[in-house]
Amino acid sequence: MKYKILFAGIAGIAVAAFCLSMSSCVSIPKGARAVRPFKKYKYLGTRYEIARMDFKFERDLEKVTANYSLKDDDVIKVVNRGYNPKKGEWKESIGKAKLVGDSTEARLKVSFFGPFYAGYNVIAIDPDYQYALVAGNNLKYLWLLSRDKTMPKPVIDQYLKKAAALGYNVQDLVWTRQ
């Protein structure tokens, strides 16, 4: 009995340590490079989602936006919002993002669920910060974002070519209705 309690305690500590280590484990897809130099203040504001790799938190959403504002010097408030026409309701998620490592590199970690973070990597952006290509931790997450509800076709083509070269199956993108 004494050993069962000891084993349960050790297992609990191991699980807690694993969860804690995973909470700050963010990555970037193999071969991808985050934008450098990156000016976080220039990135702030509202962006419209032009396309995304579909996943359960955004399934069936249209009119999707992401708003980035500075909470304090180290934390960016993230408000993702989209409309689900099947349910006739808006869905909103509020989270936070922090730069990972070098403050001049567009590698961030974002969290919408407590201490658990995921990678948010700006891998392409135009000089005026109007259009962005954002990669998640792996090839399951990709977004094309714009300051406007549309994105010029040459920019889309450039971003799709870059994503495909990294291994993304760009045919699987969901094109967001704005």
Image: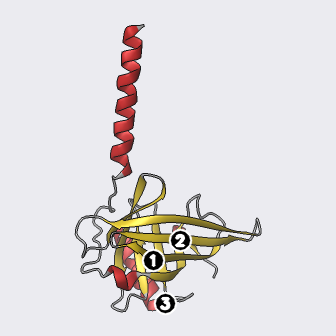
Asked where in the image residue 157 lies, by quadrant, the reply is: bottom left
At 24% across and 76% down in the image, what residue appears?
Answer: 104
117 or 123, nearer to the observer: 117
Side (left or right) of 23 relative to 103: right
Of the residues under marks 1 and 2, which one precedes in the sequence? 1
At 33% across and 45% down in the image, what residue appears?
Answer: 21
Of the residues under marks 3 and 1, which one precedes in the sequence? 1
- x then y, percent, for residue 108: 35, 67
On residue 79, the disc is: 2
17 is higher (above) or lower (below) than 50: above
Q: Which residue is mark 3?
A: 153
Q: Cβ–Cβ below 8 Å for labels 1 and 2?
A: yes
Side (left or right) of 53 relative to 106: right
Residue 168 in sight from this viewpoint: no
25 or 151, nearer to the observer: 25
Amino acid carrying label 2: it is Val
Amino acid carrying label 1: it is Ser
